[in-house]
Amino acid sequence: MKIPDSNERRRMQRRNINYYLPVKDNKTLKIIGHLVDISPAGLLMDSQVAVPTNQRYQLHLDLMENLGGKTSLNFSARSIWCHPDPIQPFMYYAGFEISGLAQSDLEVIKSIANKYGAH
């Protein structure tokens, strides 16, 4: 699915994820969406609710296996945009900008993209 203007704003190519990885709120561990694609600079997730934009989120990903010595990843991301899915209007796509990651977490994100990403 092409999201309007997403390629123009993106500085790093994202990789679509072949697995349905839940994206959770780090404090409540409640699922807020599912990972669609990811890069060290940002992520796209689908959600059953509209995600408020221009807000900072503390996110949590449970990894399917140990990557870089971690079984989960906690990070901060800012919501940039949110659009309804044109085919399934009860679903939304939301784009996030990731910032302030430690080098080890950047490597984990690269591993997620390489290991679970579509080739």
Image (tube, rainbow, N blue to C red):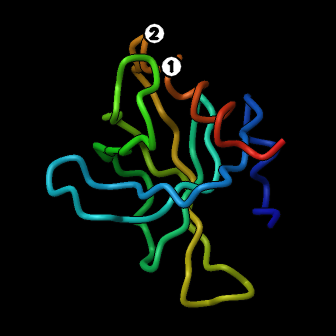
Q: Is residue 91 above or below residue 33?
A: below
Seen at 64% across and 48% down, the residue is: 37
Seen at 84% across and 41% down, the residue is: 119
Q: Give the x, y percent position of residue 20.
A: 54, 60
Q: Give the x, y percent position of residue 91.
A: 56, 81
Foreground residue, 92 or 111? Answer: 111
Q: Give the x, y percent position of residue 100.
A: 40, 20
Residue on which disc 1 sits? 106
Q: Are marks 1 and 2 in contact (CB under 8 Å)?
A: yes
Foreground residue, 31 or 90? Answer: 31
Q: Amino acid at mark 1?
A: Leu
Q: Residues within 10 Å of mark 2 (few under 14, many from 20)?
A: few
* Tally of numbered discs: 2
Seen at 53% across and 17% down, the residue is: 107
Using the rendered view, name the quadrant where residue 39 is placed. top right
Using the rendered view, name the quadrant where residue 29 is placed. bottom left
> For this view, does 1 lie left or right of residue 40?
right
Q: Which mark is residue 103?
A: 2
Q: Is residue 55 above or below residue 20?
A: above
Q: Is residue 73 above or below residue 32?
A: above
Q: Which mark is residue 116?
A: none
Q: Quadrant of the N terminus?
A: bottom right
Seen at 62% across and 56% down, the residue is: 36
Q: Residues within 10 Å of mark 1 (few under 14, many from 20)?
A: some
